Image (spheres, grey):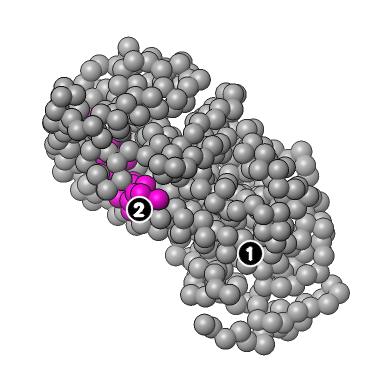
Amino acid sequence: MRKETSEERGTSSGGGASPNLEWRFNQTLRNVQGLLKGRSIPGKVLLSRNSEPLNQATSPGASPPYFNRSFSENDQDEDEPNDSSFEGEGWVLVQKQTRTGKLRNSKSTTSMGDSKGSNNTSPENSTSFSVDAQRPVAGARATDSARITKFTQELSRPAVILEKLRELSWSGIPPYMRPNIWRLLLGYAPPNSDRREAVLARKRLEYVECVSQYYDIPDTERTDEEINMLRQIAVDCPRTVPDVTFFQHAQVQKSLERILYTWAIRHPASGYVQGINDLVTPFLIVFLSEHLEGGMENWSVSNLSPQILSNIEADCYWCLSKFLDGMQDHYTFAQPGIQRLVFRLKELVRRIDEPVSKHIEDQGLEFLQFAFRWFNCLMIREVIQSFFKLKKKTICLSSSANLTLCTLQIPFHLVTRLWDTYLAEGDSLPEFLVYISASFLLTWSDKLQKLDFQEMVMFLQHLPTKNWSHHELEMVLSRAYMWHTMFNSSPSHLAG
């Protein structure tokens, strides 16, 4: 275990920073700058201590900002200077933009873990981080155009450089580019453009053959286990985004059923686990968006040819398979992969925000009781659009245990944005999910510390995310990124 140095134990009193605290600031600066440089993010990294309450850092009526590492699907043509910030429980990313696009420095003034501006200077609670991101052209639309140009340049290469594409995609992908980029990031489509069309055609045909072999057969040729699994899938499909008429279309339901059953048959170690049906929906919506316009509440599959529907279904199957390859033990018996993530989340929250961790423990609430569902469905609700009703569903953990599933209620355009980061993380996603979950949970740190056991259970089952915008999601992701930078490089960051 790493021996703690006297510098790391340094504290400050009053409003001034001690030399030991300055050392801590500088060390964090070097760590964060190194990782940000690796991500090709322009700008200057500044560290500062908190001197005012968190709720005074930005005006409460501020409109959702544009983070330099994000792509907004609702870009606006702004003539006025853009002044935006991302603020959360402890971390603030501040970005200010003049009319000419020149950088204007600003320091964040929040203290992690202390929304009331106290002078607690422990490593977990004393450091504040801000990024003044240089934006080449004034206005959100111009900035988005610059990002689109970078994406276009990468995609126009004879062979796409996946690492560069991941760096760009982490911060959000333009919606109309998302289908092609997702196929590339998952390794379903090859980087070489000359081979891409032929490979996709071959894989789509292979899926059709799999369906013919495993799905399009009479029940007399299935085992009892396979029959029961197919019945469970048939029950779950109508529960997938139930309030969207499009998803209730017979063709869409059958496509979803074929995808899930074929995947389960070809992955016998896990088989079908309730909740995997939710993981298909981002792929289905993204690949349908290539062929249908407008909001998905107005989509109609009758406008699509059988061949297009077949291709979309095949793409969803292969992308789901690629996506779950790195987390197979999340869905095997007893789901040990998820249990490991829940344990790591508990330890990380203890390191970052000990008061809320202690309160949760004192109230007798186990992290498994609420975090399991986050990891199981990767923070997707069965309710996708923000105006849909809150639904509940039961998932089977084992033959003897059930758990009510009420995962995050996030508008669907934010789900696809979140999944841009998921796919950009690649094999590191399970590890990063722990930090996203911690960032999400600690969004309500102050609120949770005022609740008893029953109130916390109800609150965590009905979290107030219904009206979230890009502002709140980018806040969660940026905070998770900073904590990952600070803690993950230390082998003992979750120890003792």
Question: Label 1's element?
Answer: helix
Question: Label 2's element?
Answer: helix
x and y percent of residue 5 in the render?
Answer: 63, 87
The circle drawn on residue 350 is: 1
x and y percent of residue 190 in the render?
Answer: 22, 47
**Amino acid on which the number 2 mark rests in the picture:** Asp
Q: Is residue 168 above or below residue 491?
A: above
- Front-lying residue, 429 or 401: 401
Q: Is residue 329 magenta?
A: yes
x and y percent of residue 351 in the render?
Answer: 62, 67
Q: Is 385 on the left or on the right of 185, as rendered?
A: right
Number of numbered labels in the structure image: 2
Q: Is residue 268 magenta?
A: no
Q: Which residues are magenta?
A: 311-334
In whole angstroms, how far apart are the C-alphas of marks 1 and 2? 25 Å
Seen at 75% across and 68% down, the residue is 49
Query: Is residue 299 at all visible to an observer of this figure?
Result: yes
Task: Name the residue that disc number 2 marks.
Answer: 329
Seen at 21% across and 41% down, the residue is 266
For mark 1, does the 10 Å Cα neighbourhood hold few (<14), some (14 to 19), or many (20 or more) residues?
Answer: some
x and y percent of residue 88 in the render?
Answer: 68, 52
Q: Is 433 on the left or on the right of 466, as rendered?
A: left
> Between disc 1 and disc 2, whose residue precedes?
2
Location of residue 255 (image quadrant) = top left
Location of residue 247 (image quadrant) = top left
Location of residue 188 (image quadrant) = top left
Q: Is 450 on the left or on the right of 89, as rendered?
A: right
Q: Is residue 123 above or below residue 163?
A: below
Query: Is residue 164 at all visible to an observer of this figure?
Result: no
Q: Is residue 335 above or below residue 12?
A: above
